[in-house]
Amino acid sequence: MNYNVYTSFTYPGRGNTYSSYKWHYYNFNGTQQAPNNGWYQWNAWDFQPYANNDAYDNLLGSEIRYADVNQRTETKNWGNWITTKLNLDGYRLDATKHIQTSFVNEWLDAVKGTSGRFAVSEAWFRNLTDLNNYAAATGGRTSLFDVPLHYTFQDMSNGNGTWDMRGLQFAGFTEANGPLSVSFVDNHDTDQQGGALYSPVVNLKMLAYAYILTREKGYPCVFYRDYYEYGLGAQIKKLMGIRKANGYGAGFEYTSVDDADVYAYSRAGDATHAGLLLLLNDGSSARSKGITTPFKSTTLTDKTGNNTSTISTDANGYGVFPVNARSYSVWVPGTGTTTPPPTSTTTAVTFNVTYSNTVSGQDVYVVGSTAQLGSWNAASAIKLSGAAYPKWSGTVNLTSGTAVQYKYIRKDGAGNVLWEGGANRAFTPSGTSLTRTDTWQ
């Protein structure tokens, strides 16, 4: 069978301006034929499998053979050239799960290095565990778009008032690994009708923006079309201003206050910034919530302008805060004092898991949704003792009354991580002590 495909790229317009390298069939693993005619492949794909082999090398065009050092060197040289030529201060890497992961790391080390330049990669893993695994595989070299959080917002949008807003508690990669997370509501892919990733947040979109723009963790990214074309620019700009003036200090989840319609979250502020209190309401009726805030004996106003009330707190920081139907409010204190969010009692939770699939040099850890359990960051997971092998045990103090999700992972000295499969385990700590007895097959 004969194939009519493109495998030679000599760049006559470029000449040898920055490189004399020319690309031919042996520099690739395969190439895409005419539309809808599939792929013609002559070398093995050199992708790194993730998520049950969901990440495939062959995405579009001619697939570069990164197993060959010549292509790796040329692509790194190009990266350094264009960085210098354009004086770049950062990079966005597209579809990186379709690129050999070891080369992604190699390219970032060679081009970004220790320069302090920013890098974010689009690794489209809808499942949080898969994204956590990719973050571990790339070793913190690049930030990652919080794809799981986008789909959480889409669930809220699709529910359009019937979704349980408590699903926003400790949500997504942003909560799991804030320093590496770039949070977003929509982007060019999710907004592209007919595209493979079409999943727009149609309803209640400003609630999602209020969430990412007031949160302690994550690096929020605003979609161009939302700001300039879809009529949300003025509201988003106002939230940006609130973030700049008041988005400081520790974040606090009000798990005992939230319900199916209303979600609350605060930033305690710092020595020079007053902090804020966020309320989101996806319900069809206006609501009010009694909340003990970090803001004692002060008055607060809704800086979004969605609510014109003035709310006063008592000496303990308690006040009753309204939020309109299908709306959001960001309450900002005026005069008064601030204190850290309410402290909570802790429960000493002992994790016991039976797991025998280890060899010398491998250990079992527990990691989960709260800071005490590493915030889904494998590097911050809690190491368990294997003294009673195959039972692994450890005790962690967790906040009483705060729902927890967790998994077990296996790590070795080289940093290789195996995550437990299946759904996250979940419970709510209570009392002075508690034991979780699990089996990892």
Image (spheres, rainbow, N blue to C red):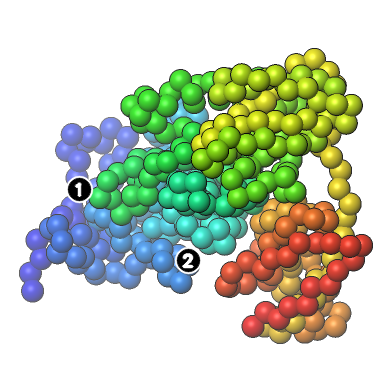
Secondary structure under badge 2?
Answer: loop
Say which of 20 and 283 sits in front.
283
Whole-percent x and y of residue 210? 56, 33
State how many labels appear: 2
Residue 170 appears in the figure: yes
Say which of 377 and 127 sits in front.
127
Q: What residue does disc 1 label? A: 9
Q: Amino acid at mark 2?
A: Tyr
Q: Quadrant of residue 317?
A: top right
Residue at 68% across / 61% down in the picture?
A: 405
Residue at 65% across / 48% down in the picture?
A: 259
Specify the quadrant that holds the C terminus. bottom right
Q: Compared to 75, does 289 lie above or below?
A: above
Specify the quadrant that holds the N terminus. bottom left
- Furthest residue to the top? 335
Q: Compared to 200, does 233 lie above or below?
A: above
Q: What residue does disc 2 label? A: 50
Q: Would residue 325 be found to the left or right of residue 35 on screen?
A: right
Q: Would residue 4 be found to the left or right of residue 371 on screen?
A: left
Q: Would residue 42 be found to the left or right of residue 278 on screen?
A: left
Disc 2 versus disc 1: distance between alpha carbons?
31 Å
Residue at 69% across / 53% down in the picture?
A: 375
Is mark 2 in CB contact (under 8 Å) with mark 1?
A: no
Q: Would residue 27 be found to the left or right of residue 402 on screen?
A: left
Residue at 49% across / 33% down in the picture?
A: 206
Q: Compared to 103, does 91 lie above or below?
A: above
